[in-house]
Amino acid sequence: MEEGISGLTMKRKELQLNQRKSKCKTWAQERVDGSLGYRDMRQLRTKLIEKLSANLAKDFDLNIHNVREHLKTHMPSFEFEYPYPDTEVDVAKALLSYLDGEDPFKRKPGKRTVKQQVHYAALFAWLATDNLSATAILFSKDISSFKRDMGTFAEDIDVRLNENKDDNMTSYQRKMTYFSELRNVGGNTAIMERAKQYFIAYMDMHHIEQWEEWIKSNKRS
């Protein structure tokens, strides 16, 4: 018996939830679709007519019934159509996005962030296979460009250089030096775990073969 009551309660709550969602979706869709809003203020009109009728009849010594009927004839209906304000439209768009299972307030990663994620993925591919050529090809780079980009990446993530390195190096020499030091992050568990996750995401996004198979087939013995 208790299970039956509990089941009915759950169904009632689920029905109420679906009704709320439906109302929210209808409210939001009307604003996004460009429909006009409708405001019914006829009750205010009625109160205004009563107030004005009494005051005008008293001030000008008129018949209150005649004044009331005259106002009813000539006063607007107090029903209005209006475009929804921009703020309401923006809120409606966010609500529809949320109802569709998205996060309307999630910040999209900028170009720099996306590029860094790709570099993390490339780092994992390179260190896991020790195959520079295959990794460069996977990420659509020639070896020289790949080393230069990864050298910049190494500098961005604060890979430490040997204290004996020459501070008067050219920009290219500096990038190559950073690249050569990049191998040292292989022992950093946190960086490598992050790099692995970005590598898996990269392979999935580009519909490339299973990431484990790619590592296995390109790993130098």
Image (spheres, rainbow, N blue to C red):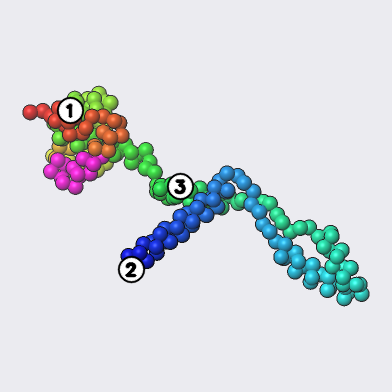
Q: Residue at x 67, y 51 (%)?
A: 82
Which-is-in-front pick, marks 3 and 1? 3
Reading the chain from its start, which is encountered first: label 3 or label 2?
2
Badge 1 element: helix
Q: Residue at x 29, y 39 (%)?
A: 116
Q: Residue 110, percent across and down? A: 38, 41
Predominant SS of the magenta segment: helix
- Residue type for callout 2: Glu
Any magenta on residue 184?
Answer: no
Residue extending farthest to the front is: 1
Q: Residues within 10 Å of mark 3 (few under 14, many from 20)?
A: some
Residue extending farthest to the left is: 221
Mark carried by residue 132: 1
Mark carried by residue 2: 2
**Is 95 placed left or right of 124 in the picture?**
right
- Residue type for callout 3: Ser
Mark carried by residue 97: 3
Which one is in front, 88 or 135?
88
Q: Do labels 3 and 1 touch, CB within 8 Å?
A: no
Up the image or down, 221 lies above or below 6; here it is above
Q: Residue at x 84, y 67 (%)?
A: 68
